[in-house]
Amino acid sequence: MPYSLTDKLVIGISSRALFDLEHENRLFDAQGVEAFSCYQREHEDEPLRPGTAFPLVQALLGLNALLPERRIEVVVISRNSPDTGLRAFNAIEAHGLAIERAAFTGGARSLVGYLKAFDVDLFLSRNPGDVQEAIDHGVAAALLYDPPADFRAPAGQIRIAFDGDAVLFSPESERIYKTQGLEAFIAHERLHRHDAMAEGPFAKLLMRLSALQREFAAGTCPVRIAIVTARSSPAHARVIHTLRDWGVNVDEAFFLGGAPKETVLAAFGAQMFFDDQDSHVRPASGHVPAGIVPYAGGRLLPQEAASPAATLTSPESPCPPAPQ
């Protein structure tokens, strides 16, 4: 009987998001495909160090052992060729990760079709263009920053933190703040405090995680979800009413009113933090694994420059098949 992914939480991940392949990426940039391919073959049995998303992936896969049936799948979706991608699968085996599926696309122009074919709920990558295209086609995606040097994942826990506006919720309110200022934003949120916000790019992922939490008895769930937002009172009320409307409970919420997010995230112990602004993600990435969520179309406002996700120079090596 065919194995269906439609009822699973599916994480799509590039090999460079899962493992530390920064040296290999620099080699590709400096010397090209042939040098990269030769290096991968020569070192394919050498272990790879964990990358930014490794703690989250490891923890999520471990959750399957606590559920009556396998509910979480991780699929490697990479621009590497099948030949150069062998090193990633060797590393997966060496680290004992239960990842069985992969798409090595050999430098395909677009990954979106494959993300949809695998029913991906979340795509994590180091390639700005791939992340932007995924967001533009309705797939939750984040561009990962370098991992923190001394991060230790909380044992037996899965901790994921989200920003609110333009991540979980639509960017409508953020646009008001950017174009009309803080007072107009507060007045708008007070007026609409009982009106649910529209879904943002990560809303469905939040709902999937919330559904997973409900499979555990009260007090036994290892998954903890936090919202870490720059909102403060009275704008916090609309967040609560929106979550109620969606039928979602989060474990922790921090309404910081502009205070730094990184110290709260470190205290929470997030295995991943998602935000739409580089000014939040960059300092947070020094404490916890973090990724930026680009705006649809690459900008919040028509007159703005492209999203930071489109300008960060950390591409996944777009390798065509290695020469034979």
Image: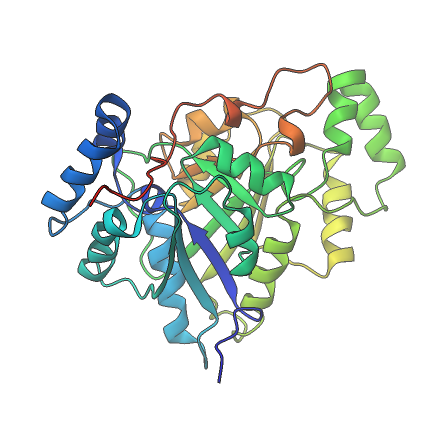
Q: Quadrant of residue 75?
A: bottom left
Residue 46 pos. (x, y %): 11, 48
Seen in the image, is 151 located left or right of residue 233? left
Look at the picture and state if 30 lies above or below 115.
above
Residue in the image at 59% along x and 61% along y: 208
Q: How is the image coloured?
A: rainbow
Residue in the image at 14% along x and 38% along y: 39
Q: Quadrant of residue 62?
A: bottom left
Residue in the image at 55% along x and 25% along y: 259
Residue 241 pos. (x, y %): 78, 50
Q: What is the count of numbered marks?
A: 0
Seen in the image, is 284 located left or right of residue 245? left
Look at the picture and state if 317 lies above or below 223.
above
The residue furthest right is: 191
Q: Quadrant of the C terminus?
A: top left
Q: Quadrant of residue 148?
A: top left
Residue 193 pos. (x, y %): 84, 41
The residue furthest bottom is: 1
Residue 61 pos. (x, y %): 37, 64
Residue in the image at 60% along x and 24% along y: 258
Confirm whether residue 234 shows in the render.
no
Seen in the image, is 63 located left or right of residue 194? left
226 vs 111, nearest the viewer: 111
84 vs 297, nearest the viewer: 84
Confirm whether residue 205 shows in the render.
yes
